[in-house]
Amino acid sequence: MTTEPLAASIAAGAEALGQDLSAAETSKLVTLLSELQRWGERVNLTGIREPRKMVSAHVLDSLAVRPFIEGERVIDVGTGAGFPGLPLAIVEPKIEFELLDSNGKKISFVNHIIGQLGISNAKAVKARAEDYAPGKRFDTVIARALASTAKLLQMAGHLVREDGVLLALKGKHPAEELAAIEHLPGWEYSVTELTVPGLESHARHVIRLRKLAA
């Protein structure tokens, strides 16, 4: 897929999500996917290689969580090749993003994109979530298909400030996972079904876990 149809596909998908992207933002998202495809020829960054599928599975799936972000400090835990963190940082330049992963090759790609696109509000961090101890906790912690919700809270719960949120992005409705955290002290949760353009046949949900004040 050439650049122009790719840009049109991204813009149309974002519009379906109720988001109006600028030409500059769309251009950066196109470059992100082009570079992901180019790097993917020599480094295993993602199992999805076809550009049209990348639009839905990576860009639009990332943008779908945008309305749930709170505050000005966000960390994407287990970011992999930078999703959802890079698309979100591109469209939310006033929010500070950290993109965390323990895979050095994937963090190298994220750093490459940050530099090439001049994403000054994003920083890549090579570390395991459970070992990461930032000087200041985050308003929003995001994790996409990283671990069960209970395990995710063990790994990354310490990164969330009081009254902040942890957003766990899931596929099908995570009923069993929710049962495991039903009576977990210090947290309250809600579940929202997401509709992602191009992924209508795939169930998508976000679990929003709020850290209660002690």
Image (tube, rainbow, N blue to C red):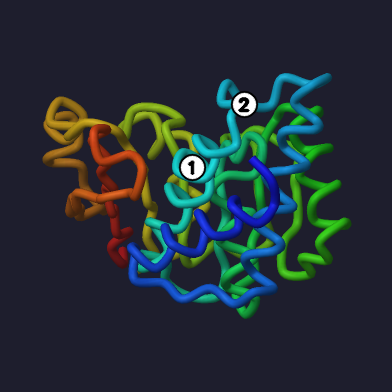
Residue located 72% across and 37% down the image: 36
Which of the 4 image quadrants contains residue 117? bottom right
| Disc 2: CA contacts within 10 A as few (<14), some (14-19) or many (>=20) | some
Q: Nearer the viewer, residue 141 or 54?
A: 54
Which of the 4 image quadrants contains residue 42? top right
31 left or right, relative to 167: right
Residue located 59% across and 52% down the image: 5
Which of the 4 image quadrants contains residue 173? top left
Quarter containing the N terminus: top right
146 shown above or below 161: above
Where residue 153 appears, as percent x and y from the top left, is 38, 39
Task: Look at mark 2 in the image and give the residue it sits on.
Answer: 49
Residue type at mark 2: give it. Answer: Arg
Distance of label 1 from label 2 (alpha carbons): 30 Å
156 left or right, relative to 95: left
Task: Look at mark 1 in the image and give the residue it sits on.
Answer: 156
40 shown above or below 36: above
| Lower sequence index among marks 1 and 2 | 2
